[in-house]
Image (tube, rainbow, N blue to C red):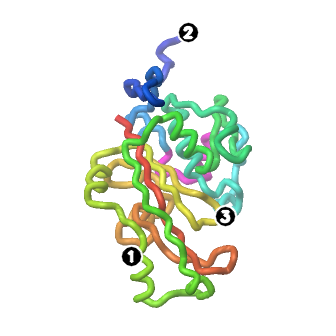
Amino acid sequence: MNINKFIPVLLEEPRRFCATCGNQQTRPIQVLRPSWRDMIKNYPNSSIKSKELYSDIGGNFPKFKTDEELLNSYLANSCAIRMSRGLNLSGFKLPKSNSGYGTKGGVMSGDNNLSYWLRVRELSPYLAEHLGKPEIDIKLDQIKMPDAYKKRNSVNPTEWQQLKAMKKVISPAEWTNLRKTKGVIVFDVSGWDDATGHFTLWDTRHLIYPGDAQHDDPTNAKYYFSMLYLKINKKNELDFVQTNRIRVWELK
């Protein structure tokens, strides 16, 4: 055995969590998180195109000939796969099955017997269970489109300002915490047709893979931390796309 070929992986010191029921308390549960150093090195950032990423992962991932072919496929959304990649290569290996965390399926095998979860809706509860309680958990409660507007295609500027005022925004105190906590971040989003949220890393200033640059631009309506914009949904009704919850698991 050649120990020189081993790649060192840092895991944070164990975090201990206890559950209580009445006067009874469970024994502490240890939660190991990958280190920030390993995750920022292994996580595929915006400079890595999805086509290149899937080729690097190998295994059962198809080799797309063009970007257009990929964008029209079931692997067009890469955010959960990117997070899977970062976790797997940082010593936090994902299981082969997502059973118990949502819809069956949605897991593919790559090289080196590593498993990649394809969807936020299963990866999110899995990480919530295995990373422990997030250091930051901000709830921006979902707002509903008033019935009077649903059959319209748009609203006027005054109406839009009234609708925006219904939505909770991140407080200055919450922003202070965000500005000093780097780690795994997940946004719960409603209104999309093909996803329930977005996973990436947060370095206290920027999202390492926002998908589109507009999602990391504080001046844009699609900035993930305050995302709220209009769309016509599958019922052909005016609706919102909006961020409803933000969680950060700190990595050190």
**Location of the C terminus (image quadrant):** top left
Q: Which residue is mark 2?
A: 1
Q: Position of residue 116 (x, y in %)?
A: 63, 40
The residue under label 2 is which amino acid type? Met
The residue under label 1 is which amino acid type? Ala
Give the extent of the magenta segment.
44-57
Q: Which residue is mark 1?
A: 165
Q: Name the residue: 66% across, 37% down.
A: 110
Closer to the camera, 237 or 55?
A: 237
User: Badges 1 and 3: C-beta atoms under 8 Å apart?
Assistant: no
Q: Earlier in the sequence, mark 2 or mark 1?
A: 2
Badge 1 element: loop
Left or right? Give the position of 44 relative to 194: left
Closer to the camera, 238 or 183?
A: 238
Q: Name the residue: 43% across, 56% down.
A: 139
Badge 2 element: loop
**Location of the N terminus (image quadrant):** top right
Closer to the camera, 221 or 74?
A: 221
Closer to the camera, 230 or 23?
A: 23
Q: With respect to residue 157, does 111 lie above or below? A: above
Badge 3 element: helix
Q: Earlier in the sequence, mark 1 or mark 3?
A: 3
Query: Residue pushed farthest top?
Result: 1
Mark 3 closeness class: few <14, some 14–19, many ≥20 residues within 10 Å? few
Q: Name the residue: 64% across, 65% down.
A: 193
Q: Which residue is mark 3?
A: 68
Quarter occupied by residue 192: bottom right
Q: Position of residue 68 (x, y in %)?
A: 66, 64
Rounded to the nearest angstrom, the CA distance separating label 1 from label 3 is: 39 Å
Quarter occupied by residue 94: top right
User: Badges 2 and 3: C-beta atoms under 8 Å apart?
Assistant: no
